Image (tube, helix red, strand yellow):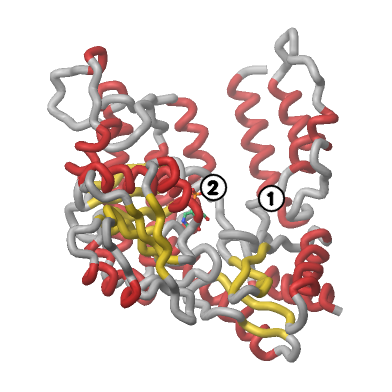
Amino acid sequence: MSFREDGHAAVDWAARYLEGVGALPVLAQVEPGELRSQLPPEPPERGEPFQAILDDLDRLIVPATTHWQHPRFFAYFATTGSEPGILAELLIATLNSVGILWRTAPALAELEEHVLGWLARLLGLPAGWHGHIEDTASTATMTALAAARAALPDRRVVVCSEQAHSSVDKAARLLELDLRKAPVDAEFRLRPDLLDLDGACAVVATVGTTSTTSVDPVAETAARKGDVWLHVDAAYAGSSWVCPELRWSAAGVEHADSLVVNAHKWLLAPMDCSCLWTARPQAFRAAFSLVPEYLRTPDDVVSLSEVSFPLGRRFRALKLWAILRCYGREGLQRVIREHVRLAELFEGWVREEPGWELCAPRPLSVVCFRRQGSDEENEAIMERANASGEIFLSHTRLNDRFVLRLAIGNARTTEEDVRRAWEVLRSCAR
Ligand code: PLP
C-alpha cells in the first residue's frame, strides 16, 4: 500500500470513529492489564502493512479507550479534538518541523507568535503581551514560576488558594519553593484580605478552578501584590473570554505577569496545546536563555527556545491556526455559549428535583451537585452511572462532602445528551 492509500484509509477510519463514537461506552470497559495481555510480548521482526494497525485500532485500542471525543463525556474538563485540529496534526507530523531556532523553522516560530497574538485579541488580552505554546498548563505554570523565581531570587514562597490546581504544588516542589495556601470564601474563591505574601516571589490566581470553576478575585489580588509576580491560571475558563458577556471573569487579568489558557481544554485543540502569555518576556528570557555555540546564528531574532525550557518544539501553532480560521470568532463563541446554556439547563433540573442539591455556584459549564444523602451513596451513583457506559462523570470534595461534577465541554454534546445524563443519574439513584 502507498502512503496515499494508507492515508485515505486512516482519514476514513477517523471519520467513521467520530461519526460513531457516541454509540460506544464512554468509559473503557476493561480491567487493568487487559490490553497488555493481548499484545505480543516480543517486538515485530518484520514490517507489517499499515492496514494491520488500523485493524488493531478496532480490535484492541478502541475497546481499551475512554472516549474523550464522546458527546457524553462529562468528567474532569470535557474537551474536543476538533476536525480542523485533527487534520492539522497530520500536517504537523508531515512537515515534522523542529523549532529549535528561528532558522530551523521560520514558519513555526512566526506562526506561533502571530497566532498567539490573534488569540490574545480574541480573548481581549492587553496589547503587547508575548505568547508562546507549551505542552500543558502544568509546564506553563512551572515555566512562569521559574521566571518569577529568577526575577525575585531572594524570595522562596509561592502563594495560591486552597482550590488551586495541583500543578502549582508540583511546580513549587520541583522549583524548591515553599507553597503557602490562602483560604477561600464560601464560593471557593481566594480571599485577598487573608493573603500573606511575605517572602513570596509569586502568587497564582485561578480563573476557573478545577473543582467548581470558581473565579479568584484577580483585580483585588493584583492590587495587594506589590512587586510579587502574578500568574493567572485560566487553563479552563480563559477560552470563555472569546464571548464578551463572559469576560467579567477576566477582570484584573491585565495586571498579570503571566497567564495560561489551555486551548486543549475548551478551545477545540486536540491534546496538547497550552498558551502562555507574559507581560514580561525579558524576565522569561533572563530565566531561560542559554545558547550554546552550535546554535549561534547571525539572525536577529529571539528564538522561542530562549523563553521556555524545551529546545525543540512541535509545530502546535499550525493546529491553533487551523482552528481559529475554520471556526472564526463566531464559531468559537457558538460552541462556548451552547456549553454554558446546557450547563445552566442541567443546573435547573437539579435545582427543581427533590432529593438533589447544588453544591457550588455555576459560573460557566460545570455543575457541582449531589444526591442528598451519604458520601457512599453518591459515590455509588457515580460508579453505577460510569459503569453503564452511557455517561462518564467525575467528582470532587467540597466542605468535606463527596460532590458530583458534570462538565460540559465537548462540541458534539447536545441537549439530548445532557438530558440522557440526568436520566441515567436519576435511575442510578433509585
Ligand atoms: N490548571 C487548572 C485550573 C486545571 O484544571 C488543570 C487540569 O485540569 C491544570 C491546570 C493542568 O492542566 P494540564 O493537564 O494541561 O497540565
Residue at image coords 74%, 8%: 45
Q: Check residue 67 in the rendering and tell me which mark sits there, or answer none.
A: 1
Q: Residues within 10 Å of mark 2 (few under 14, many from 20)?
A: some
Residue at (63%, 79%) from the top-left corner?
346
Residue 151 x/y as whole percent: 21, 45
Q: Do the residues labelled 2 and 1 touch (CB within 8 Å)?
A: no
Q: Report whether 308 appears left or right of 319.
A: left
- Horizontal and vertical percent for residue 402? 68, 71
Q: Where is residue 32 in the image (x, y as percent from the top left)?
A: 80, 41
- Note whether 232 is above or below 174 in the view shown: below
Locate residue 395: give its quadrant.
bottom right
Q: Mark 2 points at which residue?
A: 83
| x and y percentages locating residue 102 in the rendered image | 25, 27
Q: Is residue 217 above or below residue 302?
A: below
In this rendered view, identify the residue nearer to me: 196 or 142: 196
Answer whether residue 120 is visible to the viewer in this image: no
Q: Does the residue labelled 1 lie within 8 Å of ligand 1?
A: no
Crowd around label 1: few <14 · some 14–19 · many ≥20 (10 Å) = some
Q: Distance between the residues labelled 2 and 1?
A: 16 Å
Q: Nearer the viewer, mark 2 or mark 1?
A: 1
Quadrant of the drawing holding the N terminus: top right
Horizontal side of 388 relative to 361 (left or right) equals right
Q: In which quarter of the image is residue 79?
A: bottom right
Does residue 84 appear to the left or right of 241 in the view shown?
A: right
